Image (cartoon, rainbow, N blue to C red):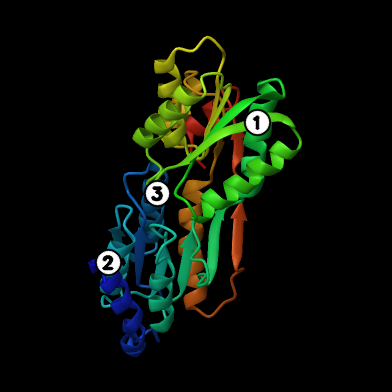
Amino acid sequence: MTFKGTLLAAAALAVVTMSSYDASAEEVKKIGLAVANLQANFFNQIKQSVEAYAGGKGIEVITVDAKGDSATQVSQVQDLLTQNIDAFIYIPAGAAAATVPARLAKAAGVPVINVDRNADGEPGDTFIASDSVASAYNVCKYIFEQAGGSGKMVIVHGQKGTTPEVDRSAGCAKAREEFPGIEVVAEQWSQIWSQDEGFQLTQNMLQAHPDVTIVWGQADALALGAAQAVKVANLPQRIWVAGFDGDTAALEALRDGVFDVTATQQTQHMGRLAVDSAIKLKAGEKVPPQQLLEATLTTKDNVAQFIAEHP
């Protein structure tokens, strides 16, 4: 068995030993926040929002960064649960082993608030995210219309099997059903949703398919990398580039014409809602199992408002 396999197996067995954790206090004094990867602007915004909002309520937040590694995150969550946290806000680092931290926290009697990504088979007490299916549908429909309703498309997916990757793929597929002239000629998956990956994967696909007219990066970092690859390729046709997230740098790039469209998520609101949900769950109040928020279709025409104040 590999080291990671051993770690995950040990973590699963640790569920039994965690059951003695004292979570009887009704008041939330300390929150554990496990973040997938703080290199991503989206996750950084959630972290900042959680810490600022909780801090204003006198709640301590202990934040850990998995840097995209599931095994690291399992170990970090085990450590969090030894620090008497009253609630657990959880952004899984990937699809693999995502259930383990949620299971550990639940066995310890700690409320679990999942943000952006859910643990398949072991969902949190509530799941807070954008309605990625509806928003991806809107993004793809817009870019298809701009491209004239036909053309060849390549997709740079996010991390395979994660909630946003699955939902955004489904939303765009729904839009493609309405545009039979759009042909997906290639698609590749990233590992950490990064700009470098967006550049490299798009460059590979453009070399194989130089007649592409649409590129969709399932996150703004991927879209920015894709836009860079399009620029370097210097192909004669107009290539439309779409993203998703409403990252700070991406909004400015969108304003400047670097790429064409995104969906701006309510990132700051997600962080505040996660803290409020933690307080309610700890107090024994009911919270909806899913809390899906609208992500706003954003183009050069309406981007200024989100640069001025991110929702």
The foreground one among 164 and 157 is 157
The foreground one among 15 and 179 is 179
User: In 3D space, how far apart are the residues under numbered discs 1 and 2 (Cα atoms)?
Assistant: 40 Å
Amino acid type indicated by mark 1: Glu
Left/right of residue 137 with respect to residue 261 in the rendered view: right
Residue projecting furthest to the left:
3
Q: Tag 1 or tag 3, which sits nearer the N-term?
A: 3
- Residue 127, by quadrant, is bottom right
Residue 221, position as x, y percentages in the image: 42, 36
**Residue identifier under label 3:** 43
Q: Is residue 168 visible?
A: yes
Left/right of residue 220 with respect to residue 261 in the rendered view: left
Residue 278, position as x, y percentages in the image: 47, 69
At label 2, counting other C-alpha atoms closer than 10 Å, the crowd grade (few under 14, some 14-19, many 20 or more) is some
SS for tag 1?
strand
- The answer to whether residue 95 is above or below residue 20 is above
**Residue identifier under label 2:** 4
Frontmost of labels 2 and 3 is: 2
The foreground one among 78 and 288 is 78
Asked whether the residues under the numbered discs 1 and 2 touch, taking CB atoms below 8 Å apart as contact, a structural biologist would say: no
Amino acid type indicated by mark 3: Phe
Frontmost of labels 1 and 2 is: 1
Residue 125, position as x, y percentages in the image: 53, 72
**Residue identifier under label 1:** 183
